[in-house]
Amino acid sequence: MAEEKKLPNELEGEILTDERVKVKKPLMYRVVLLNDDYTPQDFVVWILEKIFLKSKQAAATIMLEAHTKGKAIIGIYTYDIAKTKVLHVISLAEKNQHPLECVIEPEGENG
Ligand code: TYC
């Protein structure tokens, strides 16, 4: 009688293990602060401290970079965290009637 060929996963008595674990690095996004002519500097610094957990010194440096150059990178986060922080900024800015804006950009894109 012809021997039946078994597929690899039907081999009797074998313990099948696969040690390879594929872990993909998450895509990362920059949160970029945009300058405007109306939002008070102190409010921008407060936002950076409150939402992005920056020190007063770091917040002031980022605010001044946006103020002088037009924009500044606040930080790099996973998509959900970046998006949540941006929505939080816009919500607080609107509540205080400031036009402050920040946007997210895929990390790796020029800018
Ligand atoms: N340019 C604003 C002013 O002079 C301050 C400011 C800084 C606004 C950074 C936004 O992202 C910003 N009042």
Image (tube, helix red, strand yellow):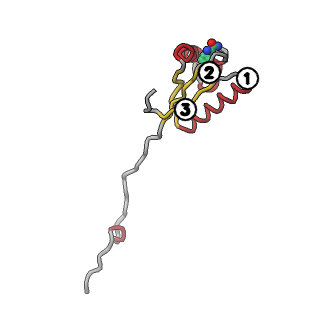
Q: Residue 104 carries which label?
A: 3
Tell me the residue that label 1 is attached to. 97
Q: Distance between the residues labelled 1 and 2?
A: 19 Å
Amino acid type shown at disc 2: Glu
Dot 1: element: loop
Q: Indicate the position of residue 66 as horizontal and vertical percent values.
A: 55, 18
Which numbered disc, 2 or 3, marks the residue that appears first in the sequence? 2
Residue at (51, 24) in percent of width and height? 73
* Image quarter of residue 53: top right
Q: Residue furthest left?
A: 2
**Who's the residue at 33% across and 71% down the image?**
7
In the depicted structure, whether residue 79 falls above or below residue 14: above
Of label 1 and label 2, which has the lower sequence position? Answer: 2
Q: Contact (CB < 8 A) between labels 1 and 2?
A: no
Q: In which quarter of the image is ligand 1?
A: top right
Which residue is under mark 2? 49
